[in-house]
Image: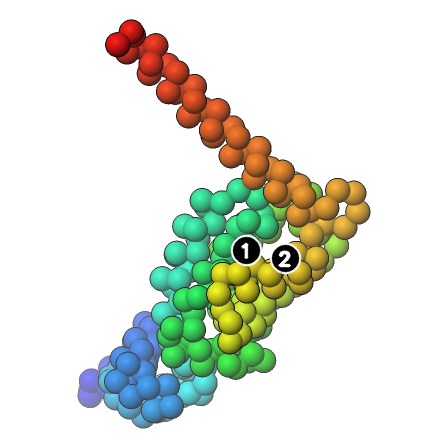
Amino acid sequence: MTAVAQADRSDDGSVRARLTRAADVEVDQHGVDGLRMEAVAQRAGVSRATAFRQMGSVSELLIQVALLRAERHIRAVDHLVRTKNGAFAKVEAALIYTARELPTDPAIVALIARHSASVHHPRVHESAVRVMGPVLEAGQRRGEIRTDVGLDDLIDFLVEQTYLAAEEADRSEASVRKRFRQFIIPALEARGGVGGEFLSHAREVEQTVSAASEALENLSQWLRRRGPG
């Protein structure tokens, strides 16, 4: 049995992973426009037919490469939002980061350019839910984020806004903040009662004051233990 035939009989998930990694190398060497299924299949050690059966098209292969490369950005955003208080501060920080960083990778740029094919792609949606799902759900529980729209729809809206921000000519922090506060907050914030943005900012201030008070108390205790100089 040939090596290719053996590879063709491997676990489908393993084959897809090898094809994605092979395509990642091909994009590095030949660019997005030079991506060819035949070359990817050869590099991955599978037949051309298997490559097409697993991936379906070069477009799908490119999406998988972009998602592979996006993983480090997903980890960075996940870490970033943990440092912020309030749903809107977290979403804003994520949008500023992605608008700055995503356009630096040609595979991710190609993914963004395929709006209709990628916004609702299951793995794109899954990745967005993994990072922003808990943020939005916590915001809903605290009365910051609207609850009259399903979480999946809110996630898809944020993915679309991420794409639009990444495609803007002006991707500066000031520009992203302006877009976020003028258009995205009104679309996300809770309806009725005190505005969701106000609640989010109030909670952020409250937690900042609490942290400052704790720091002052720790300093006071340290000075008392130290005694007179």
Q: Is residue 168 above or below residue 56?
A: above
Q: Is residue 192 above or below residue 56?
A: above
Question: From the image, which quarter does the C terminus lie in?
Answer: top left
Name the quadrant containing residue 199. top right
Name the quadrant containing residue 228. top left
**Three-letter code for the amino acid on which mark 1 is drawn:** Glu
Give the residue at x 51% y 34%.
Answer: 208
Q: Is residue 106 visible?
A: yes
Residue at numbered disc 1: 92
The answer to whether marks 1 and 2 mark residues whose Cβ atoms lie closer than 8 Å is yes
Q: Dot 2, crowdedness within 10 Å: few (<14), some or many (≥20)? A: some
Give the residue at x 37% y 20%.
Answer: 219
Give the residue at x 59% y 50%.
Answer: 88
Q: Is residue 7 left or right of residue 69?
A: left
Residue 121, image x, y percentages: 53, 73
- Given residues 114 and 122, the one toward you in this image is 114
Residue at numbered disc 2: 181
